[in-house]
Amino acid sequence: MMRLHRMTFRPLFAALLIATMAMVAAPVRAAFIDLTPSGGSNSSSSVSLADLISGAVSGITVGDKVFTGFSYSTLSADMPKAVSVSVEGFKDMNGNWGVTFQGAFMDLPGGDPSSDAQIGFDVAVNATGIANGLRISDAHLFLDGANVGGPNSSFIVDESFAQQFPSLPPLVAQVTTFGPGITKLSDSANLNPPVKMLHVFKDINAIAGAGSIAPARGTVISQSFSQTQIVPEPAVAVLSLLGMVGFVCKRNRQRG
């Protein structure tokens, strides 16, 4: 029986050890996570925004919607880190599917003039829905847990779709004490033409004005997406009908 010399065995062992360590150190990419709510408006579980950005989680599914391509940036230390932002599945009162971002988005009194954070993601109809002609036709924005602690303060969420709809005004949900003050906790927009996938960009801005005794903050930002079924173009419908007629005629000839 042939035996390996010690000098031969050592390099083999070292190579095996390096390969094993590389496998252990390699990041594990998780599959999509299903966060479809089973009761109520939000899912019972969540995933951190940091995991979605890093690729530790590939994306999430909520009902017939698929969410991928998450990004996050902050321009102030007052805004939360991505690891402190949780993402949940969401279902609005009309049964439309979406996502909720929960975190301590805020601007503290006496600090920078304002605080800002930006979230981006893609939402798409799942493969079955696309095959059935379903397209995203409307977007809905909701704000909850928002308050400001003094005059000349605000918490505002702008949501835009500029890559695909550059002329569409952004959705806006806000609580402000500028002038007479504004409280608007929801907004929606129609998307024309409806799309298979929509890129969403969300800007979160908070201002705790001079004299504020509490932060300007919001904790729950949700959005949902409704859809419509696209009717095939007349030419496509005619071609499909001709194909069916041809199939039936061929089958009748074979029987005859």
Image (tube, rainbow, N blue to C red):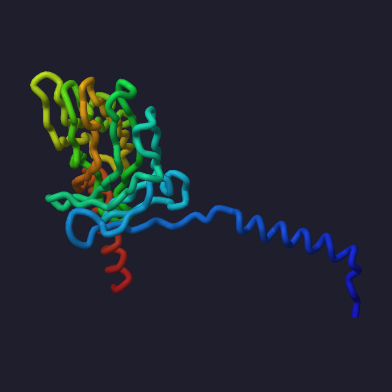
Q: Nearer the viewer, residue 128 or 8?
A: 8
* Image position, residue 198 (x, y; %): 31, 39
The residue under the point 20% across, 52% down is 91
Q: Is residue 126 visible?
A: yes
Name the residue located 34 percent from the left edge and 34 percent from the top edge. 79
Judging depth in this view, the residue of 50 and 110 nearest the camera is: 110
Q: Position of residue 147 (x, y in %)?
A: 18, 35
Write the residue at 21% across / 35% down: 191
Residue 151, picture quadrant: top left
Above or below — where is 1 with respect to 174?
Answer: below
Quadrant assignment for the N terminus = bottom right
**Residue farthest left in this picture:** 180
Left or right: 17, with 212 as reference point = right
Taking 159 as reference, is 16 above or below it? Answer: below
> Which image quadrant for residue 78?
top left
Considering the image in quadrants, where does the C terminus appear? bottom left
Q: Residue 100 in the image: x percent, y percent?
A: 26, 46
84 lies left or right of 101 = right
Task: Tell me where residue 108 appears, x and y as whole percent.
Answer: 29, 30
Number of residue marks: 0
Point 33% across, 24% down: residue? 111
Is 82 on the left-hand or right-hand side of 41? right
Q: Is residue 231 visible?
A: no
Name the outermost residue toward the bottom: 1
Foreground residue among 173 and 169: 173
Say above or below: 46 vs 169. below
